[in-house]
Image (tube, rainbow, N blue to C red):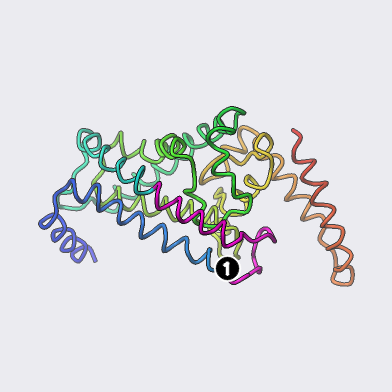
Amino acid sequence: MANALERGWEYLINNFSEFQLASLGSFIIHEGVFFLSGLPYLFMEMWGLKKYKIQGKMNTPEAQTKCIIRLLLYHTCVNLPLMMLSYPVFTWMGMTSKLPLPSWKVVTFQIASYFILEDFIFYWGHRILHTKWLYKHIHSVHHEYATPFGLTSEYAHPAEILFLGFATFFGPGITGPHLFTLWLWMILRVIETVEAHCGYDFPWSFSKLFPLYGGADFHDYHHRLLYTKSGNYASTFTYMDWIFGTDKGYRKLKSLKQGTEVSDEFLASSILLLKFGVIYILDLASHPL
């Protein structure tokens, strides 16, 4: 496996410049991973698949099309230039594309560090974006989709792309990793944010497999509440919101939902109660506990 990777990498560095790989190569990988991981959730909505859907509401075809068109525009006009302009910074900090590839121990340690750093910075940046002025003029674009689907993860105002994008690239920026590590980090980060916005809570979702992982159910709650009361600001993990008490409404909702479980003979009436209960629960969640 290692030999195959190194042979493939050798082909890349012999046929393309480091700038081409770090900018255009990164852009192509990002687009491929983003759309390949996000489109299945779009198709699930288009086909009306409701099992495991967190919210019953589906986005209209017009809303889905608007999202895709704006994403292509922002990716081309914001993401690509940003990748090109950031190349000198990464090389100045020590990024390289030369062989040999880094060991898996180094790669694993760096990416784990990036996730922790990104989550910390993202939490505070995201929380700041929920202040009145910044939400109204910038972050409200991302919240146009109260019922998110995978591709809405990167649907945002250009200023927000730059602002929160800093959290993603801060770790690699200060460590100057191998380009291979940077690509792998980008792939995992894209998959994570798409899954968090997918709108489905599967039995095999990441949050069921990894402790302290937020996932779709955690972030979907953030999208369906008013911007001043939503909480759940972290990007990947749950501990930042727990430490600073910004997940109290979510945890209260989860505990109340679990308390409404009833036997099958009362299923019909419980569904009716739940419809009214959700309004009451959300109202409770909108006040600090």
Q: Residue at 36% x, 50% y: name it.
A: 186
In the rendered image, the residue lying farthest to the left is 14
Q: Amino acid at mark 1?
A: Met
Quadrant, the C terminus: top right
Magenta stretch encompasses residue 73: yes
Instruction: From the image, tell me which residue sits under label 1.
Output: 46
Question: Does residue 19 appear to the left or right of 38 in the view shown?
Answer: left
**Where on the picture, by quarter, is residue 272?**
bottom right
Picture coordinates of residue 12, whole percent (x, y): 16, 58
Nearest the viewer among 81 and 14 is: 81
Q: Residue at x 49, y 66 (%)?
A: 40
Residue 256 in the image: state x and y as whole percent: 79, 50
Q: Is residue 98 above or below residue 135?
A: below
Vertical placement of 201 versus 240: above or below?
below
Q: Which residues are magenta?
A: 47-74
Q: Position of residue 19 (x, y in %)?
A: 18, 45
